[in-house]
Amino acid sequence: MDGVSHDREEETAEAKARWFQSLSLAERMEYLCAITDLVLENNPRIVDLKNAQPVAGRVRVLSRPGL
């Protein structure tokens, strides 16, 4: 897609995953660093949380048709 769209279908988790996958590795890293900076600016104590659990394997986006 080129340009700006106002289509709600482009806001689905699947559409967002496709967009992220379309980025180059450098663009993905830049985006992740920007999000990390945003989180840390808004909640610097988040690094003190000790109960984070790793996710095994790949993350898969699931959705129910019609929602």
Image (spheres, rainbow, N blue to C red):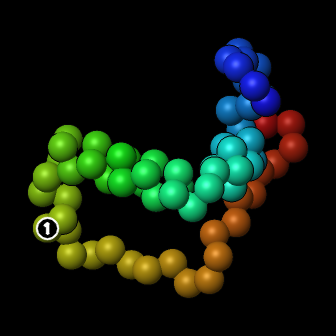
Left or right placement of residue 34 versus residue 13 in this view? left
Quarter of the picture holding the N terminus: top right
Q: Answer with the quarter of the image where residue 2 lies.
A: top right
Is 54 positioned to the left or the right of 1 in the image? left
Point 18% across, 65% down: residue:
47
Q: Position of residue 11 (x, y in %)?
A: 68, 32
Residue 15 position in % (x across, y down): 74, 42
Q: Which is nearer the eye, 12 or 64?
A: 12
Front residue of 54 and 40: 40
Tell me the element at label 1.
helix
Is residue 41 found left or right of 65 in the rendered image? Answer: left
Image quadrant containing the C terminus: top right
Residue type for callout 1: Asp
Q: State the residue lying farthest toward the right.
A: 65
Could you tell me if residue 2 is visible in this image? yes
Quarter of the view holding residue 6:
top right
Q: Is residue 13 visible?
A: no
